[in-house]
Image: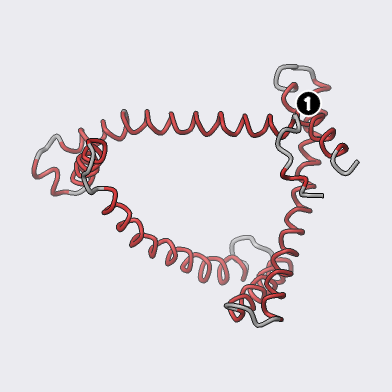
């Protein structure tokens, strides 16, 4: 019963949410809206469970003085501080949470983290641009053209360089991006159908 009931619930709601796109009836649409509101409520409880899980795992490491336990303690303390400040003072612009914690602390730290990723991106680009095959050569040439077209030096070398870069970004690059998006969408649909029909059951756990 621990597996059959969740599978039947998933099958019912999954098929209903699919069918409601093909049945333009007010009752079906109203019921679908009600189900979506239920999903928001379930998601809210999932956030609560996620926070509790983060606290449990980190406090366990802190109590055992495990690896990087001071950072775990800072994580838990920051979690409770931001949660308390947000619940008491609100999170709208002008509040302490938004102006002090989010804008003056979280945003700069997030920007610093992404800035450090630039070194890893440069290293990965260097390894990718080593021409060993014709595909790598095409990638290197295209990347060089795009980089030159985005800086003033490229326009000084050839006045049509910006137009060439716009074509590369708007035609070949867009074709590749849309192909990737279509593939990802088909994969998401396939995964969703596997979960709806009970083929994929990893979310049920091992019990």
Where residue 144 appears, x then y in whole percent?
A: 20, 44
Q: Quadrant of residue 114?
A: bottom left
Q: If the image is split into quadrants, where does the N terminus sit? A: top right
- Residue 35 vs residue 195: left or right? right
Q: Residue at x 66, y 70 (%)?
A: 79
Q: Residue at x 62, y 30 (%)?
A: 189
Residue at the disc numbered 1: 16
Q: Quadrant of residue 89?
A: bottom right
- Residue 23 vs residue 154: left or right? right
Above or below 123: residue 108:
below
Q: Residue at x 38, y 63 (%)?
A: 115
Q: Residue at x 29, y 48 (%)?
A: 128
Where residue 36 appears, x then y in whole percent?
A: 76, 37
Where residue 183 appears, x then y in whole percent?
A: 50, 30
Where residue 170 appears, x then y in whole percent?
A: 32, 31
- Residue 41 vs residue 92: left or right? right
- Could you tell me which secondary element the residue under label 1 belongs to? helix
């Amino acid at each position: 019963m621990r597996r059959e009931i969740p599978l039947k619930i998933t099958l019912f709601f999954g098929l209903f949410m699919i069918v409601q796109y093909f049945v333009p009836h007010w009752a079906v649409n109203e019921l679908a809206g009600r189900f979506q509101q239920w999903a928001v409520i379930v998601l809210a409880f999932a956030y609560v469970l996620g926070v509790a899980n983060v606290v449990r795992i980190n406090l366990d490491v802190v109590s055992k003085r495990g690896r990087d336990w001071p950072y775990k303690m800072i994580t838990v303390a920051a979690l409770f501080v931001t949660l308390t400040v947000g619940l008491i003072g609100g999170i709208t612009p002008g509040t302490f949470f938004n102006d002090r914690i989010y804008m003056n602390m979280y945003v700069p730290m997030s920007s610093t983290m992404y800035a450090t990723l630039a070194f890893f991106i440069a290293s990965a680009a260097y390894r990718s641009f080593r021409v060993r095959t014709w595909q790598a050569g095409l990638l290197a040439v295209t990347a060089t053209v795009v980089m030159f077209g985005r800086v003033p030096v490229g326009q000084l070398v050839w006045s049509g360089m910006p137009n060439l870069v716009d074509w590369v970004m708007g035609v070949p690059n867009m074709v590749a991006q849309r192909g990737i998006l279509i593939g990802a969408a088909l994969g998401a649909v396939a995964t969703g159908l596997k979960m709806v029909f009970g083929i994929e059951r990893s979310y049920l756990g091992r019990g």
